[in-house]
Amino acid sequence: MAIQFLSSPPLVSAASLSVTTAAFSAPAGAVLVALCFAENATTTFTLSASAPTMGGWNGSQTSVLQGRAGAYAAALTQAQASMTVTLMTNGDDCALKVFVVTGVDTSSPFVSYWPASSTTRVVNQSVQTMLDGAWVVGAATEWSASATPTSTDVGEAFRVVSQMSGIAVRKAAATPTASTITINFTTTASTPRWAHIAAVLRPSNDQAGSAAQVAESDAARPITPVKTPAGPILRANTFDGAAHGTVVTQVNSGGASGHAFTSIAGSPQVSDTFFNDGYRMAVVNTQQDVDTHLDWTNVTVTGNVFTARLYMRLTSDVAEAQRLFVLLGAGDIVSGVWLSPQGFLAVFRGLADEQVAVSTQFVPLGAWMRLELRYTIDGAGSGTAEMWMYFDPDSDLANDYVVTPVTTWPGGKPNGAEFHLQHDAGGRWYLDNPAVGNAKIGALFPKIVRPVGRAVESDTATSMRPPLSITTGTETAQPVARTKTRPVTAASDTALARPLQRVYARPVGQAVEDDTVFEIRWDLKVWTAAETTTATPVQPAKSRLVARVIDVDDVWPVQRFKTVLLAVPDDAGTARPVTRFRIRAVQRANERDLPGSTWLGPAVVGQLVQAAETGAARAVTYQTRPLRVAGVYRIWRITRTRRAWSAGSPTT
């Protein structure tokens, strides 16, 4: 699909910290290209859209002593009827131009960036497109602000008087074939100070385009993942054709595993310790400090693109920087990718001549991740390298993406690769599913994450995963956690309260028809019972359920200490526990039907008087603290109903 520029909002500028575009519309899968301008050379650009974007904003910027320009891009996840983009800065003047573009590779919109600065009135910046069908855009800030810039290309300029001026530019058409072109910035200022950047938009020719619209159907059918690589592969190996513990050699590396390796150094060993989505085998270096790698050489590649993919699982951080991947050329090593002890990945020109890019995320420990590399290098050895890290190994959304500046690489055009398995005193990693190709390869089991066109005559969004079967004919809720559970049945219709723990207790007379539970201890509150026949345990204390009492559904907590419940005595209104010391009398009940709070009064022992006419059941709780109480039959002795309670010595 060729790149197309759609209707876009006009450029906005202001002498302020932020600007927001006018509202505009964009189709699903469109890429927003944001060209940013600022007066201050140390300004930080922060972009945000009012609609969700895929993977955030990727881009680059340039600056001179004064002035800054930047180019960024982000893909939309769904169509937008009305949206805006806002640029936030930490400077005092800024401007923003947003292009709406289709036909751009949404996973990596830019092939390369070309930052520069100039002090001439006319700037013709040279740019290498590197790919057929690429399209060049550019942004330039002119700090002197003496005039409004112009361009021989398609441009949109601004000027904040006495502050800064600038222009957003794009070529009038895509370049049919990879070539070197120029992009123009012009001013009439006497002493111009330019900060400018050009960016090459990557066409989606080497990617699976967005799904076509479903026609004459009301349902979107689920897409089933298959074991098929997403991009064009020239060499690939899964290690599945060998048994666990087998040492991989040049002879046994092919067959059911895939393409045989051209050469192998060391003794990589097949392992089923870890596997990825149905693929059973990986390889690991079991020998410490032995250089081990698996190579493909003399790979015929058409065009300027050479790509590589690998899955890795780092068991622990390495003690020293170790080689992970080496790109080979006809005459020398083109590039090396190294893993640092801190877990970061760095791309080098040559094996380790010059670091040209480093990841912003570190490799996770104890989990599979996918690494993809794309080198775009012409016959003269000039070009860029890109690196993606996917912590969800089969996702289409990268957790990290870096791209190098345009670099002159040694060794000529790439034609081979080494996949390394290092093992030092600090750690090692497992390798699975290495592959090389001439376009970005993608996941072994690609997940569909790009938007699919809406089905005609249907407003229903259908899941892109295979539907789950539905269990019918039962309403039983099944436990989903590995916890022991026991069902609690409804309380039986009985008027007897039965304690369910081993305590010495006597039942208290019938409770009246009252649904209110009152406080029976200063540190324990039980709230009003609901009208339900289900007995509910009170948490977090261990509790057992008490059966229903007449028409009251109250659940009474059973405390974890010995208690003695006294029956309602005849002709007595106060129940007093007989104890050896610290006797507290229970306050006489008032003439009401509600249990009152316990009053801790003085230690008074006297004749029990007649109880007031009340139906409230009051639990008198006695907690043994420092004393050991012998058998109950020795402690409590009841004479006659109308007399006082007495007890012998607790130790006799």
Image (cartoon, grey):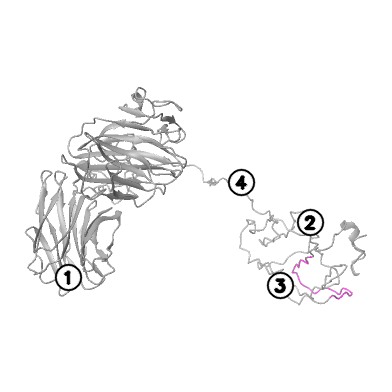
Magenta stretch, residue numbers: 603-621
**Residue drawn 22% across the image and 40% down it:** 410
**Mark 2 residue type:** Val
Do the residues bearing badges 1 and 3 touch, measured as CB atoms within 8 Å? no
Horizontally, is 520 left or right of 603 in the view?
left
Q: Residues within 10 Å of mark 1 (few under 14, many from 20)?
A: many
**Mark 3 residue type:** Leu
Marks 1/3: CA–CA distance? 82 Å
The residue furthest front is 353
**Residue drawn 13% across the image and 44% down it:** 178
- Kindly identify which residue carries mark 3: 594
**Residue drawn 38% across the image and 35% down it:** 432
Q: Residues within 10 Å of mark 2 (few under 14, many from 20)?
A: some
Do we see residue 22 in this rendering? no
- Kindly identify which residue carries mark 4: 484
Label located before the other in sequence (4 or 3): 4
Q: Which mark is residue 503?
A: 2
**Residue drawn 36% across the image and 40% down it:** 323
Do the residues bearing badges 2 and 3 touch, measured as CB atoms within 8 Å? no
- Kindly identify which residue carries mark 1: 164
Give the x, y percent position of residue 600: 77, 74
State yes or no: residue 618 in magenta: yes
**Mark 1 residue type:** Met
Marks 2/4: CA–CA distance? 27 Å
